[in-house]
Image: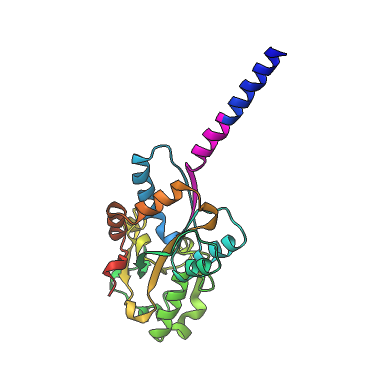
Amino acid sequence: MRAVSLFAVRVLIFACLFVVWHTAHAEEKITIAAAADLKFPLDEIVVLFKSTHPAAQIETIYGSSGKFSTQIQQGAPYDIYFSADISYPRLLYLEGLAASEVQAYGVGRIVLWSPVRDAGKMTLNDLTDPAIRKIAIANPKHAPYGKRAEEALKAAGVWGKIKSKLVYGENIAQTAQYVQSGNAQVGIIALSLALGPELAKQGSYALIPDKLHQPLEQGYIITKRAADNSLAQTFARFVAGKEARAIMTRYGFVLPDAVK
């Protein structure tokens, strides 16, 4: 009986130690849902973060800000949400689905980009050229960059003239792919993608005047799901730090404290 009791005690101790170990390491993994315009800067930020937090397991999923917001409302297992439109995380915060205040991380810019035309010399009026048969923008129904593209085209007075040429990407990354693949001659995409390693070598771009559209103010939250996840909190603080902000600036984002 005494041997059996000792065995039971050992099993109990092992189980307790496992629970303690699991609890201590559960925070070492986070899943991030991020707007597609963050692909290159956020990938760099994650690599930099992991250089000082080697045990951290970070999965980053890129896509449409609007779709991610809906998924979080439906219980999707995301720990941090970066949105290209700050209104989405603000709504989630009001709905009680955030474990942090909404933090602005930058203002994005939209550009005309093309690998087959000298986009650097183009304006929105040039999109009416009959030689341009297809123009790619993100879907305005759920992609913030698509909404701003629509606003700019309407403000420039060319929306009605070019609407029949438009092809819609589900997010801004897919929009850029349409132009890369030749399915469109020109696209209205994120400056952060135009400055990325792939597109920068393949084409040219022209900034679209920001007076033609509402600001692309962007922000993030820690979701309610990650309220007790210390890695999520640490990473969120890192994003607000000097090194991460320098990366964001390099990809064309205007930092929150630089917005007048």
Q: Confirm whether residue 137 shows in the render.
A: no
Place of residue 110 in the rendered image (x, y in percent of width and height, measured from the top left)? 37, 70
**Toward the viewer: 114 or 227?**
227
Residue at left offset 48%, top offset 85%: 160
Place of residue 185 in the rendered image (x, y in percent of width and height, measured from the top left)? 42, 68
Q: Confirm whether residue 244 shows in the render.
A: yes
The quadrant where residue 245 appears: bottom left
**Toward the viewer: 28 or 212?**
28
Q: Hey, which residue is sitting farthest front in the picture? A: 2
Q: Quadrant of the N terminus?
A: top right
The quadrant where residue 2 appears: top right
**Toward the viewer: 90 or 141?**
90
The quadrant where residue 4 appears: top right
Q: Quadrant of the C terminus?
A: bottom left
Place of residue 80 in the rendered image (x, y in percent of width and height, measured from the top left)? 48, 55
Asked if residue 98 lies in the magenta stretch, the reply is no
Q: Which residues are magenta?
A: 17-33
Numbered-mark total: 0
**Toward the viewer: 27 or 115?**
27
Place of residue 234 in the rendered image (x, y in percent of width and height, measured from the top left)? 40, 49
Residue at left offset 34%, top offset 53%: 197
